[in-house]
Image (cartoon, helix red, strand yellow):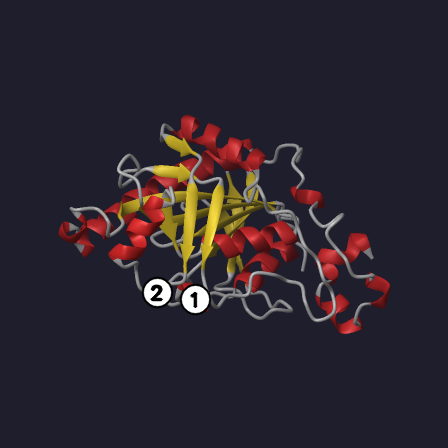
Amino acid sequence: MRSDVRIGIVGGSGLYQMAGITDMEEATLDTPFGKPSDSYRIGTLEGKKVAFLARHHRNHTILPSELNFRANIYGFKQLGVEWILSASAVGSLKEELRPLDVVLPDQFYDRTKSRISTFFGNGIVAHVSFGDPVCHVLSDVIGAAGSDAGVPVKRGGTYVCMEGPQFSTKAESNTYRSWGMDLIGMTNLQEAKLAREAEICYSTMALVTDYDCWHPDHDSVTVTDIIKNLTMNSENAQKIIRAAVKRLPVERTCKCGTSLQHAILTDLKKAPVETRAKLELILRKYV
């Protein structure tokens, strides 16, 4: 299926639908890697065709470790998406990154243990460049969109991606702080890796809900407080997304669109037919 939707949106905790999408239809996709988290809601936003996916399902029924990241990203590829704007709830590891702040991290640190983070294997080997894990062009667009929407956006920082579903111990949280980490979450690293392999531009808005457990006031935070912050973060994220969509698409001057050009080590003519068929959508211009 190719609908030539160029802009994809991933909604995290608290963002289960995108207000303002008109002429909406739902696309339930099958991919070579199984089913995505939910159907893709395709419609028009700010005059542009977009596809929205609720990362944890619209009813929030999927744990971070249960997410089929490959299916989610491959589904966007099937739709023709070139840009993925991700929104994700995070905890803060820095005093200056306060609840309700919106941050565009530019680095990740992997603390996950049991996740599949690549489309490759089974006879085809590829190693994409990942030194700069988010698309700087898309991050620039989102940063400018924050100004358009009147929502301050902080640029830069490292997102620690932990396994979950439990939150950190204080020992872990303080260790991440001693390493100079800024934010902690459970989902974005695998999305970024797979988007790079799929040659899709990816950037995430990290929406701070609270301080991680290192903070002396952490125990005074209630579920009610967190839900309130999730709701306010969702409203701000949607303002930024709408403003970003208005600015997109722009010229892809980044290397995201050609990230596989020098990454594939296997002679594809000699690769297993079944694996080539499974990855046909990603590999077609290199076969």
Q: Classify residue 253 by image quadrant.
A: top right
Image point (19%, 50%), residue name: 218
* Distance between mark 1 and mark 2 Cα atoms: 7 Å
Label annotation for residue 250: none
Residue type at tag 1: Ser
Does residue 101 appear left or right of residue 39 in this picture?
left
Residue in the foreground of this view, choosing between 151 and 194: 194
* Residue 234 makes an appearance in the image: no
Q: Which residue is mark 1?
A: 65
Quarter of the image where the N terminus is located: bottom right
Image point (17%, 51%), residue name: 221
Question: Residue 11 at x, y = what percent?
Answer: 43, 52
Query: Mark 2: which secondary structure?
Result: loop
Residue in the foreground of this view, choosing between 30 and 255: 255
Question: Residue 70 at x, y = what percent?
Answer: 57, 62
Residue type at tag 2: Pro
Q: Which residue is mark 2?
A: 165
Does residue 255 appear left or right of residue 268 in this picture?
left
Quarter of the image where the C terminus is located: bottom right
Image point (25%, 55%), residue name: 170
Q: Residues within 10 Å of mark 1 (few under 14, many from 20)?
A: some
